């Protein structure tokens, strides 16, 4: 075989390709070489520049937001640990943090937890993951190693990295006596005077266990017992991250162990709140020019809600979508801020403009133009440049108002009964980016419900909206007008109280009409009539109606779908085909390839008359797969071979015992492949039989 | 849907009026759950129904495909095309001409290629499980393969025959087109790897070739480690060792996997400019399947400048990753169906139809045997013959050391117990013989080879 990675004696092959690790010299060289290969392909492209600029911005924002939210969530926990040794303790102070099942997000959470602890409580913290702690020895060595070696690290930060490793204490030397010695050396005890003035405040040793459930119970029990016996000399504190519920704690720690710890439970933020937070502050704002289209957005949300609840996964999906979006070509480089637009357009080459011309919405733009402008658009790059600049500026402006008024709408409808438009901001976004939200039934229903709202409720909402629009700092004429009208409405409603009494008489009239009825029959008729004829509106109601029509008009003006604007593809990504790269449809693809190979091969010979038919021309594995679908649990290989032969060579039906060796080889290989793919395995129940491992036909 | 949503408030009101104590919220919740259930049901129905592609997500595809294709000058014919595409995938000829038209726009062509593939949802029908399990004993005939005149083939023969048979000649063009299509993704793969994603390739057919091409074309400047997951005696330690010792040239090499991982992480962090690509042919291979292995691999995958490109073939392969592993791996899935034979992958499996030739074991035995002294050869032959004579007995324990000693003494092969032991040590070192202690305390000698092979070995010896 010419392939160097095929061998009967080796499974791993190394191609060093001239790489030499270690010295700083080679490091620089490597950097250069990597720039040679990768950069030349991507990093000089305009779209990639825009992409990485935007992504870095988003990443930074996410990090900042994470820090902020986590530290507020964790502040109680940190306070608890900080104060745990204020009074003498007999049990290990233990904080249990209920984290929720979105495991992938916890890395960030516990990362900032240790940061907080190191900042506010004690520089000594150790994180123990279940995979590092297969047995008690490993666990303890690991913990002590983290305590002892971290101190060394911070001591000689400036020295070379190689030395750092050498000065580390070996794992096998990490014992409790070492820890005790180290601790006493760091915090010498002056026993008699200690109460008067502690020379150096004894810092707490914090042990963080992020994935409590994945630990072996026995190891944990022993661990707790051991550290509790050192409690008088070493001030330990524990933090358990529990993904399910506190009962997990009780289940794995029996009484004699749990009596050694004093547990306090803390609740972390649910991941849905976390996601909303991230969405509302980062992705669904006008600052982020990249927008997810409705379908993609709901795909990601569904994946979050019904699959993993992981915000990290969501962000990852968005990142993938972004990469996919930008990689369309340089046209997408325009998905950026207003300030970079001009310089970007100046860098555009003819090909880039061509790239823009391939956008679908460009066609409708051309069609709406005058004939001579049409030709200019198609042929003149400079003309297109000006148009692009103008259109994209409009689009960015549109995006700003779109988000602004979407927020306003959210303020209005978020607490309506039954939440016709959804409870979350993201639901509003999804609807409005997908279709014209003002023409939906839910929108109309919401406004009908708004029509029942009392003065106080409306007033609060209105002032909030006015504040939102005002704080946006948008000074276009339209928006200013909106603010003006809104403020007028607010004032009108505020001053309404006095006029309330005037409307009192009308109601009295009604009562009079009802009481004048002579018979029961008449009363009934009158009442019926009254229900049918619409009550004359009082002044407040009239005003409310006016207000609502105004609001509807405003929303109709600003919340139209982005799809109608030219060049919306540059900002809104809606290619659902990336789904298969995010979720993977491995089973479906395998099944489809086996059942209907034409889907992949695009050949003319394998058109299936119906799903279960088997054709001679199909690849052998496919034939055999379809044959095996017809069988029960056990499959006789000899019979399978016969049916295979009937399909492959229908004309030859004389002697079925003498087979052409080629055919036998093909059959053999096909069976081996089915076995390899996990559809059959050899059975010991009967000679020359295989068992089916799947059961759906 | 409309009817119920309009009705809801009215009904709620009347109920409120009639029964004052009736709590309002539960009704809301009920109504919502009902609405959701109806939604869900309808969506499920859509998914189940294959011919009707009206589910939420597929609509978009057809829409966008028609949109994209209508962009070109040949509007009408293409619209027809995309329509027929949705209905059935049989308008191949017109499509190929269409592809030719699009030659200028590589992007477009790519889109078309992806659009052509309509992979139906694969919905596992749970009822099938019960019908498959409930049927009592599946009845099969008693035919065996012995009925065939031709014996089982051995691996070498099989490969030769397969090459000769070339069953899918008529598909050769399709195969190469598939390969070309897969190659168009290479740059995208590389950029994905550099953006912190790892690649997972799935689909029918061996993906080893395409990965080799990818490696040869794009991964020539940076170190690459290729792991054959299907290799039967692969261990995780092998993988870690190659990365640690061969690539990173680390002086430390701890036995503990997690510690090794720690060191790799640190060294990779130090060599910031480098990129290490690890290619796993079959990350779902037998020896990598265990949770512990995957944990370690996932940790490797989460290192910034270590990029994993992995393939899976087994139908249930994705089960080996739980949520935290998946998130660490950060895979982008890629359908790379090649229809290539799994020749290399399956040659290690002992398929029941392939005769295990054992040529490897036999030739190695021969090689060692040839280098032995005359006396040692005779000693070995005594053990072999004894084992062959007793091959019928069910509980063959091996030749007793004492018996061997006396047999050798009689043939003037050794003079002392110690000399015989010295000879045997050599056999044991080459794994030609195994010592076994029986319950009675006697030392037994066994040759760990199939008897048929031994017979062949004896037959080959000059008498």
Image (cartoon, coloured by chain):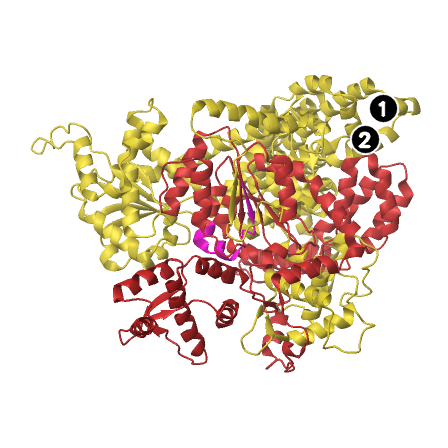
Chain colours: A yellow, B red
**Dot 1 and dot 2 within a common chain:** yes
Q: Which residue is mark 2?
A: A362
Please tell me whether residue B134 is drawn above or below residue A68 in the rendered image.
Answer: below
| Residue projecting furthest to the right | A371
Q: Position of residue A204 (x, y in %)?
A: 24, 37
Between A517 and B344, the one nearer to me in the picture: B344
Q: Quadrant of residue A185?
A: top left
The answer for which chain carries disc 2 is: A
Q: Position of residue A233 (x, y in %)?
A: 16, 41
A493 horizontally vs A558: left or right: left
Which numbered marker is on residue A377?
A: 1
Magenta stretch holds residue B291: yes
A596 horizontally vs B329: left or right: right
**Chain-order first, disc 1 or disc 2:** 2
Magenta highlight range: B278-294
Specify the quadrant that holds the C terminus of chain A. bottom right
Tag 1 and tag 2, C-beta contact below 8 Å: yes
**Cα distance between the residues tagged 1 and 2:** 9 Å
Q: Position of residue A467 (x, y in %)?
A: 58, 27
Residue at 30% from the left image edge and 47% from the top image edge: A139
Magenta stretch holds residue B280: yes
**Of helix, strand and loop, which one carries label 2?**
helix
């Amino acid at each position: 075989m010419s392939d160097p990675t095929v061998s009967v004696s080796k499974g791993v092959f190394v191609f060093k390709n001239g790489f030499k690790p270690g010295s700083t010299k080679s490091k620089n060289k490597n950097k250069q070489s990597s720039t040679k290969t990768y950069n030349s392909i991507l990093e000089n492209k305009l779209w990639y520049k825009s992409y990485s600029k935007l992504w870095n911005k988003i990443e930074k924002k996410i990090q900042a937001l994470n820090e902020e939210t986590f530290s507020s969530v964790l502040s109680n926990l940190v306070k608890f640990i900080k104060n745990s040794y204020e009074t003498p303790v007999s049990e290990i102070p233990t904080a249990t943090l209920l984290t929720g099942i979105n495991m992938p997000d916890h890395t960030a959470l516990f990362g900032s937890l240790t940061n907080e602890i190191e900042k506010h409580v004690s520089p000594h913290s150790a994180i123990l993951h279940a995979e590092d702690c297969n047995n008690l020895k490993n666990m303890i060595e690991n913990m002590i190693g983290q305590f002892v070696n971290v101190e060394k690290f911070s001591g000689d930060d400036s020295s070379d990295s190689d030395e750092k490793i050498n000065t580390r204490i070996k794992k096998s030397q990490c014992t409790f006596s070492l820890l005790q010695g180290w601790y006493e050396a760091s915090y010498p005890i002056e026993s008699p005077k200690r109460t008067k003035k502690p020379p150096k405040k004894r810092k707490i040793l914090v042990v963080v266990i992020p994935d409590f459930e994945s630990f072996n119970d026995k190891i944990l029990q022993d661990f707790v017992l051991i550290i509790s016996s050192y409690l008088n000399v070493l001030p330990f504190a524990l933090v358990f991250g529990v993904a399910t519920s506190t009962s997990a704690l009780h289940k794995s720690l029996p009484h004699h162990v749990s009596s050694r710890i004093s547990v306090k439970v803390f609740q972390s933020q649910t991941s849905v709140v976390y996601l909303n937070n991230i969405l509302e502050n980062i992705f669904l704002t006008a600052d982020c020019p990249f927008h997810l289209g409705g379908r993609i957005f709901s795909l990601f949300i569904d994946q979050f809600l019904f699959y993993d609840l992981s915000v990290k996964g969501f962000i990852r999906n968005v990142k993938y979508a972004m990469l996919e979006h930008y990689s369309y070509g340089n046209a997408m480089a325009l998905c950026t801020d207003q300030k970079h637009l001009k310089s970007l357009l100046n860098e555009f080459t003819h090909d880039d403009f061509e790239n823009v011309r391939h956008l679908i919405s460009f066609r409708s733009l051309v069609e709406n133009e005058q004939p001579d402008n049409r030709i200019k658009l198609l042929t003149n790059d400079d003309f297109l440049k000006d148009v692009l600049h103008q259109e994209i500026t409009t689009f960015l402006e549109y995006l700003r108002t779109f988000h602004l008024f979407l927020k306003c709408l959210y303020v209005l409808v978020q607490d309506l009964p039954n939440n016709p438009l959804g409870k979350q901001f993201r639901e509003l976004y999804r609807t409005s980016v997908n279709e014209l939200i003002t023409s939906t039934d839910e929108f109309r229903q919401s406004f009908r419900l708004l029509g029942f709202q009392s003065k106080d409720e409306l007033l609060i909402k209105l002032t909030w909206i006015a504040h939102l629009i005002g704080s946006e700092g948008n000074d276009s004429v339209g928006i200013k007008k909106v603010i003006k009208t809104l403020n007028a409405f607010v004032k009108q409603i505020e001053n309404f109280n006095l006029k309330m009494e005037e409307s009192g008489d009308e109601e009295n009239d009604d009562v009079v009409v009802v009481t004048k009825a002579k018979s029961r029959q008449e009363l009934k008729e009158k009442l019926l009539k009254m229900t049918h004829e619409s009550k004359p509106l009082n002044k407040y109601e009239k005003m409310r109606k006016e207000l609502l029509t105004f609001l509807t008009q405003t929303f109709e003006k600003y919340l139209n779908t982005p799809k109608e604007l030219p060049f919306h593809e540059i900002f809104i990504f809606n290619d659902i085909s990336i789904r298969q790269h995010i979720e993977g449809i491995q089973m479906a693809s395998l099944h489809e390839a086996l059942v209907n190979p034409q889907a992949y091969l695009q050949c003319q010979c394998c058109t299936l008359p119906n799903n279960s038919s088997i054709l001679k021309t199909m690849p052998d594995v496919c034939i055999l797969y379809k044959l095996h679908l017809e069988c029960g649990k056990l499959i006789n290989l000899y019979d399978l071979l016969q049916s295979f032969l009937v399909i492959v060579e229908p004309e030859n039906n004389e002697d079925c015992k003498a087979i052409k060796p080629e055919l036998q080889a093909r059959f053999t290989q096909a069976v081996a492949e089915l076995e390899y793919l996990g559809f059959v395995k050899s059975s010991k129940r009967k000679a020359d039989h295989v068992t089916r491992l799947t059961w759906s036909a | 849907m409309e009817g119920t949503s309009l009705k809801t408030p009215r009904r709620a009101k009347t109920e409120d009026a009639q029964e004052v104590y009736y709590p309002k919220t539960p009704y809301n919740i009920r109504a919502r759950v009902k609405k959701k259930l109806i939604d869900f049901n309808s969506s499920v129905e859509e998914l189940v129904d294959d011919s009707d592609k009206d589910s939420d997500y597929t609509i978009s595809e057809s829409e966008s495909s028609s949109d994209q294709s209508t962009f070109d000058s040949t509007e009408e014919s293409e619209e027809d095309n995309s329509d027929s595409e949705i209905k059935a995938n049989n308008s191949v000829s017109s499509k190929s001409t269409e592809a030719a038209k699009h030659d200028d726009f590589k992007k477009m062509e790519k889109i078309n290629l992806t659009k052509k593939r309509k992979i139906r949802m694969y919905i596992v029908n749970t009822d099938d499980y019960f019908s498959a399990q409930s049927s009592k004993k599946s009845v099969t005939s008693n035919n065996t393969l012995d009925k065939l005149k031709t014996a089982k083939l051995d691996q070498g023969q099989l490969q030769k025959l397969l090459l000769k048979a070339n069953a899918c000649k008529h598909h050769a063009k399709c195969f190469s087109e598939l390969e070309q299509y897969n190659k168009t993704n290479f740059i995208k793969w590389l950029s994905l790897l550099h953006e912190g994603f790892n690649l997972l390739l799935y689909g029918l057919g061996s993906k080893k070739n395409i990965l080799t091409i990818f490696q040869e074309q794009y991964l020539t400047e940076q170190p690459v480690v290729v792991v054959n997951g299907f290799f039967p005696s692969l261990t995780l330690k092998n993988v870690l060792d190659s990365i640690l010792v061969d690539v990173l040239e680390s002086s430390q090499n701890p036995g503990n996997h997690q510690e090794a991982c720690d060191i790799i992480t640190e060294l990779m962090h130090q060599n910031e400019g480098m990129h290490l690509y690890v290619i796993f042919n079959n990350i779902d291979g037998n020896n990598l399947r265990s949770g512990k292995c995957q944990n370690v691999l996932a940790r490797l995958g989460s290192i910034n400048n270590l990029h994993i490109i992995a393939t899976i073939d087994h139908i249930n392969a994705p089960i080996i990753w739980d949520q935290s592993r998946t998130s660490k791996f950060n895979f982008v899935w890629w359908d790379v169906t090649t229809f290539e034979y799994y020749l290399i992958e399956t040659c290690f499996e002992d398929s029941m139809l392939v005769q295990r030739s054992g040529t490897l074991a036999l030739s190695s035995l021969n090689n060692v045997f040839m280098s032995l002294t005359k006396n040692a050869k005779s000693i070995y032959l005594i053990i072999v013959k004894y084992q062959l004579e007793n091959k019928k007995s069910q509980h063959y324990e091996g030749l007793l050391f004492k018996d061997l000693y006396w047999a050798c003494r009689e043939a003037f092969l050794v003079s002392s117990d110690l000399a015989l032991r010295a000879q045997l040590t050599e056999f044991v070192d080459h794994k030609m013989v195994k010592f076994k202690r029986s319950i009675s305390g006697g030392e037994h000698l066994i040759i760990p080879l199939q008897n048929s092979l031994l017979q062949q070995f004896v037959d080959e010896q000059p008498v």
